[in-house]
Amino acid sequence: MNQEAVFRIAVLASGSGSNLQAILEAIDRGEIEGGRVVLVISDKKNAFALERARQRTIPTIFFNHRNYLSREDMDRDIVESLNKYQIDLVVLAGYMRLLTPFFINAFQDRILNIHPALLPSFPGKHGVADALKYGVKVSGCTIHFVDEGVDTGPIIMQEAVPVYPYDTEETLHQRIQVLEHKLYPRVINLFIKGKIKIQGRRCIIDEK
């Protein structure tokens, strides 16, 4: 952690930022003790996540991938910005770009991601649609550390929701998001407190 008492969090988002909003509100309620979002980054200029941050005077940065010759070139600039803001934890909240090994190594075991399915089933961009198409009776959300694979990092926490016969991708995703907004702040708080330990592929959580 940096020299300040505050644990400094950066959120990377590509869309509306509903999980960002849930994290900010959890901080307001004191559910993320000692943590503060000090930077929001997006690869989409008009992502509403950026507007949510601006409404709270949180610094924002838009990175346009078209300005770079490679993914690593862009990630190098992002990492430089994260270091400038002395970031302790990177939280992916609907960030739709794969991170390069350079980025992951720079913040090893300090990058969290949330996925709208019960990993290792249905990784990738279409987890909700893929689960519905497969015909599962239970789905849910997964929070995990980020490694170099697609949604393959050690799983920290999961919670399930039933899949109903009348579900559409939208209705199922809405129920999953309710879980996401509860679980993500909880995991971030546990991380800040040093309560999550990685042992091989297993995450051991001490919630005492």
Image (cartoon, rainbow, N blue to C red):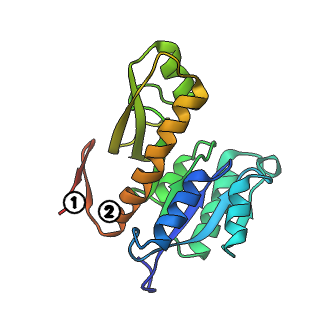
In the depicted structure, whether residue 58 falls above or below residue 63: below
The quarter holding residue 170 reads: top right
Amino acid on which the number 1 mark rests in the picture: Glu
Give the x, y percent position of residue 15. 68, 47
User: Which residue does the numbered mark 2 point to in the structure image?
Assistant: 190
Q: Quadrant of the C terminus?
A: bottom left
**Helix, strand, or loop for circle 1?**
loop
Give the x, y percent position of residue 11. 57, 60
Give the x, y percent position of residue 168. 58, 22
Total number of numbered discs in the rendering: 2
Amino acid on which the number 2 mark rests in the picture: Leu
Q: CA distance from mark 1 to mark 2?
A: 7 Å
**Residue at image x 38%, y 74%?**
33
Asked whether, in this view, residue 135 is left or right of residue 98, the answer is left
Q: Quadrant of the N terminus?
A: bottom left
In the depicted structure, whether residue 117 falls above or below residue 133: below
Give the x, y percent position of residue 67. 82, 52
**Residue at image x 27%, y 41%?**
201
Q: Residue furthest bottom?
A: 4
Query: Any mark on residue 55, and which?
Result: none
User: Which residue does the numbered mark 1 point to in the structure image?
Assistant: 207
Instruction: Pick whichever of labels 1 and 2 is earlier in the sequence.
Output: 2
